[in-house]
Image (tube, rainbow, N blue to C red):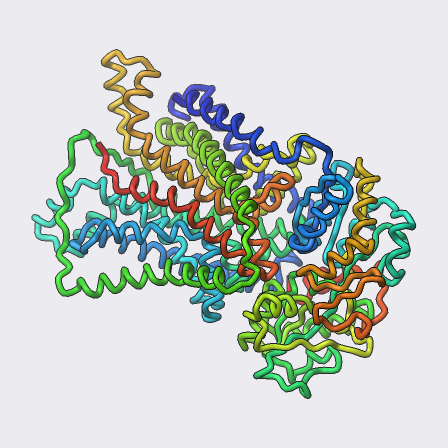
Amino acid sequence: MIATRTALGLAALSLGLPLLAACGEDEPTLVIYNAQHEQLLEEIAPAFEEETGIKVELRNGKDLELSNQLVQEGDASDADVFLTENSPAMSQVEQAGLFEELPAEILDVIPATYRPTSGLWTGFVARSTVLVYNTDLVETSELPDSILDLADPEWAGRISFSPTGADFQAIVAAVLELEGEEATRAWLEGIKENGTVYDGNNVVLEAVDSGESEVGIVYHYYWERDRVEGGDVSDNSQQYYFSDQDAGAFLSVSGAGILKSSDMNDEAEEFLEFLVGEQGQQILADSYALEYPLNPAVPLEQGVKPFAELDPPQVNVSDLDSEAVVDLMTEVGFL
Amino acid sequence: MAGGASPLLLLVGLAVAVLALVPLGYVVTTTAELGRQEAVDFLWRPRIGELLWNTVRLLVAGVVASTVLGVAGAWVVERTDVPARGWWHAVLCAPLAVPAFVNGYGWVSTTHAVQSFPGAVMVVTLSYYPLVYLPTVAALRRLDPAVEEVATSLGRSGWSVFTRVTLPAISPAVLGGALLVGLHLLAEYGALQLLNYPTLTTAILQQYATVFNGPEATLLALVLVTFCLLLLGLELLVRGRRRRARVGSGSSGVPVRVALGRYRPLVLAALTAVALWALAVPLYALTRWLVRGTSASLDVGELAATAGTTLWLALLGGLTATAVAVPVVWLAVRHRGLLTTAIERSVYTASAMPGIVIALALVTVSIRVVPTLYQTVLVLLLGYTILFLPRAVVSVRSTFELVPPGLEEVARNLGCSGPAVARRVTLPLVLPGLAAATALVSLAVATELTATLLLAPLGTNTLATQFWSDASSIQYGAAAPYALALIVLSVPSTWILGSLSLRTTR
């Protein structure tokens, strides 16, 4: 009887496997480990497939989840291309020596500020740090000059953020790079004391909009997207851009790179060329993503604050150290 | 030691145990890589204390609330004259079709009040009490009311009959359910993350999202596993060595139903409240997102493809786990001994591991040991099997326990061959249990999120991962159809479970 059941199980297995595996076996496909928003890539990938005839498959995850997975997989990885939301995950894979050097045709398109000097990967879109504030609870005159001021006692019980996400950790990396370890630790301790911790920037946005929290540290596109969607969690709030190259005006770069383990290097290069080229960047600019394209020829419109009006601090993307950030945040008790 | 089980069967059982212990082995080995001082430094922090306190109080309150609600509901449906009992039974089972994270999503998008300890207890209780309710209803159904009648005729009051006679008789079912609830709470991620209630498990996931399978996350997992083992030990202690089998397949009498009398409106109000809280709130919130989000422009083809994949994975996962559960249960029930109990218990340990720990254990092991298996459906199914084997075992076991071994011995003595005994005697008796196990596991697979995210081969999206991806990038409207599909997909197996629990033994 047991044998029968096992046989039944195996039969079911062998029946099911080919069906499930049928998705990707027929022709070589470009495998992208994608930590960027899926919706964004779901617009780019079909356009690229149509343009080049190269099939693309997305493996979606979060920045550090996928970067760590790449490090774990090493040479055995299926991945051809890696895309992130923030640069620290790119740096991690870069430091593990897994990236193939990019050709000049790709690198030259993007201004040098938005890619590492190593030339092992490049930025392709960027997002600005903002402070979302509830318009019923906060006067514009109260808004702080610097993101560091949020650690002051006057903000006790009023702020929220998502410390476990790669987004916030990139902001901490920028603060660390700009202000040094002591100041960053003190700042983290201050905002931990003052703030409510949520998991996810959308949750922060919602908490601010509903008045659970007065202000929240997020990236600009969360609020913008929700406005486009109908304003469910943004109609009681506005966003405030820090200026004067404050750490709070930090512009986080989403990176793209090609893995050494890839057996489709040419196709991967074609994909990156498309991604940073005008056609790809225009798709990004017109998309729901609302992130800033980094190809200077393509502006982001759709009512978002123009790229030229941002005043971000000068941060070398290669210097953002995720390991030091994690250590600090563990010490302070966020992790 | 194993009561005369065939070596082959033992070997199969041991193989299953080894498979189930892979995640634990991974956790222990990775933890061992960390120096003792480092481990102490990491664990001896205020943050860990906060996580422990959150986990323990949620565990205790959630299990108690689920047990009270589940047993009370089962008693009302089975032992009182409440009107429309069939309808209330369906209503009380139905929350099983709403995944905990969808329930949490519905509540959070309705009120912020649930982002608190009482809120977390409420939401997890509403999601998980059916795990106590279902086995309790089944046990009450199967319990010969003659026992209760005798107690009543000897002068016991209704309450006294319940606590002194009924409750001890159904206690294995209740305890089994409570154990499941406890294990679910320890491993729950989606709902608690939405409720912003940090526990050991959500912290492990955050660690993984930040530093992957670093030793810190496995340290947390080790603490979590310790909790699970304590829980298992507790259940083992309470359940003891009782054996439950009703000899004779004669029909049991019709139970005398307690007249609710003037309490009837109160009971009906309570049942209605459960229905509203557990079902109406999440469903209303979902409908609201469906209607309101402009991103709800739905890609039907993608939804259908995702639903198809989910269906297949659910079915395969259910069949695999049930097939694997049978030898384990057979050994544990029929060849009770240290070794076989150890095999059964080792299967349970996996259930306290969050899906992501199992997933990463399998990712690591498959990359290091059998790289060809990595990124295949087989590894995903292996993950599902480890993850949901405990559920299959509990379900299969509850029926196997009700088959008196004497029946098989009689059949054999009457000249029936071994296979014929299995086919003509055992199988008809345990088939409902096997079906229930398959349904339970399929239901769980269809709504599994974390392990699927990591183990699903390239391009394989399930309804749960699609829902999560949309919801976490604030496309609430786009997420709603997937959540709805998840619920629709879970209805059949919930229905099967609900009706199986009402079936009396022949």
Which residue corresponds to the image point at 83% horizontal and 39% vertical from the top-left?
A265
Q: Is residue B338 visible?
A: no
Which residue corresponds to the image point at 53% horizontal and 30% vertical from the top-left?
A16
Between B214 and B335, the one lying in front of the other is B214
* Residue B492 vertical position relative to residue B53 in the rendered view, above or below: above
Residue A76 lies, in percent from the top left, at 75, 36
Residue A224 sits in quarter: bottom right
Between B466 and B213, the one lying in front of the other is B466
Residue B492 lies, in percent from the top left, at 38, 43
Which residue corresponds to the image point at 50% horizontal and 31% vertical from the top-left?
B16
Between B4 and A157, the one lying in front of the other is A157
Which residue corresponds to the image point at 81% horizontal and 49% vertical from the top-left?
A272
Q: Is residue B233 left or right of residue A279?
A: left
Residue A133 sits in quarter: bottom right
Residue B443 lies, in percent from the top left, at 43, 43
Q: Quadrant of the N terminus of chain B?
A: top left
Residue extending farthest to the bottom is A141
Q: Is residue A68 left or right of residue B409?
A: right
Residue A310 lies, in percent from the top left, at 79, 73
Q: Is residue A177 visible?
A: yes
Residue extending farthest to the front is A50
